[in-house]
Image: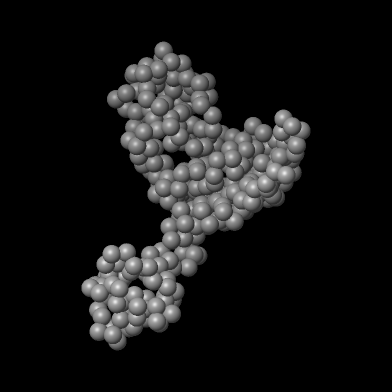
């Protein structure tokens, strides 16, 4: 039995534009989301993230390909696993004149969930103390947290969140990120769709990066960053111009910024120290600068984006 919670194979979605042109929104996508933790689904706006999620949830039909949730083929057997899935894909509809608690209580009765889960869900999303306020008085961040609380009434094994921090202020973003990390640590598998690099790097254990509807790379965040070669080495010396001259003579590429050198082409940073020490120059600081997820993301998506054709 597969230990993957979400699995797609050659998933494709085509539709016709208003000009009757064929548009490929998702292009032979192979997606694999392992059990447990937070998995980032990262891509620029318009890269096919929301379309993929809608197909997984049976809200849109695939043109071709296969999808599985908890090993079950969907949409054919989606009813078998739907009780294990919570999703916030579109703005939920709550009654503005009701309190957050009353909205959740009515929803719990509708789905047959015990009332004890209302308190638990409100507590997990940090709304205790504001739960008796009317929904219409909630900030955007509080409304987003209540939407997530609604999905937790089912105690889902999989939680799918599509751009959950869109439009939030910094405090709201921090609260949502903290909550997502806690849910992942508690054993819920979270699929976090986002185009915000910092969000994914701070919250996610693993990530799939897509562009133009295609999978560009996938794996644990630290592994994806580690696949790229080391960047420049930051070096500080007392005589930067003199040091730069000697390093260039040793075939390094050097950029001088004040008292700091940025040295490229150093497979072994110790070689920089050796070259300078032989000239009586001694390093005050030597720090290899590793690329972050932003570097990896931009390089991958730049490669995936075809050049624009000039109009004749």
**Most distant residue in the top direction:** 97
**Residue at the (71%, 33%) spot, across then down:** 17
In this rendering, would 269 be left or right of 62? left
The number of numbered discs placed on residues in the rendered structure image is: 0
In depth, the one of 276 and 248 nearer the eye is 248
Q: Position of residue 62 (x, y in %)?
A: 71, 39
- Above or below residue 238? Residue 299 is above
Q: Position of residue 194 (x, y in %)?
A: 50, 42
In this rendering, would 17 be left or right of 187? right
Colour scheme of the rendered structure: one colour
Classify residue 148 by image quadrant. Answer: top left
Which quadrant of the figure contains the C terminus? top right
**Residue at the (40%, 19%) spot, across then down:** 135
In this rendering, would 210 be left or right of 226? right
Is residue 132 in view from this perspective?
yes
**Residue at the (29%, 77%) spot, across then down:** 242
- Above or below residue 307? Residue 142 is above
**Most distant residue in the front direction:** 312
Q: Position of residue 234 (x, y in %)?
A: 34, 67
Q: Position of residue 147 (x, y in %)?
A: 46, 28
**Most distant residue in the bottom direction:** 278
Is residue 153 in view from this perspective?
no
């Amino acid at each position: 039995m597969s230990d993957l919670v979400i699995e797609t194979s050659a998933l494709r979605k085509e539709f016709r534009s208003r000009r009757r042109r064929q548009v490929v929104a998702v292009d032979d996508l192979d997606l694999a989301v392992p059990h447990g933790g937070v998995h980032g689904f990262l891509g620029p706006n318009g890269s096919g993230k929301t379309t993929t999620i809608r197909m997984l949830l049976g809200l849109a039909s695939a043109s071709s390909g296969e999808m599985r949730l908890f090993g079950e083929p969907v949409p054919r057997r989606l009813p078998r696993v739907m009780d294990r899935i919570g999703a916030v894909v579109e703005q939920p509809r709550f009654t503005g004149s009701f309190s957050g608690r009353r909205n959740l209580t009515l929803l719990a009765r509708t789905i047959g969930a015990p009332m004890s889960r209302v308190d638990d869900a409100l507590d997990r999303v940090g709304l205790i103390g504001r739960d008796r306020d009317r929904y219409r008085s909630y900030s955007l961040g509080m409304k987003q947290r209540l939407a997530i609380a609604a999905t937790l009434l089912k105690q889902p094994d999989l939680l799918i969140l599509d751009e959950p921090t869109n439009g939030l202020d910094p405090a709201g973003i921090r609260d949502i990120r903290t909550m997502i990390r806690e849910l992942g640590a508690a054993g819920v598998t979270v699929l976090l769709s986002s185009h915000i690099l910092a969000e994914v790097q701070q919250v996610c254990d693993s990530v799939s990066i897509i562009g133009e509807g295609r999978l560009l790379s996938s794996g644990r965040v630290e592994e994806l960053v580690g696949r790229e070669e080391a960047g420049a080495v930051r070096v500080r010396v007392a005589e930067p111009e003199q040091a730069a001259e000697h390093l260039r003579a040793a075939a390094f590429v050097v950029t001088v910024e004040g008292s700091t050198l940025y040295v490229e082409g150093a497979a072994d940073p110790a070689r920089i120290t050796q070259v300078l020490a032989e000239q009586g120059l001694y390093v005050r600081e030597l720090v290899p600068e590793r690329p972050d997820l932003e570097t990896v993301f931009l390089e991958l998506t730049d490669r995936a984006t075809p050049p624009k054709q000039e109009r004749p």
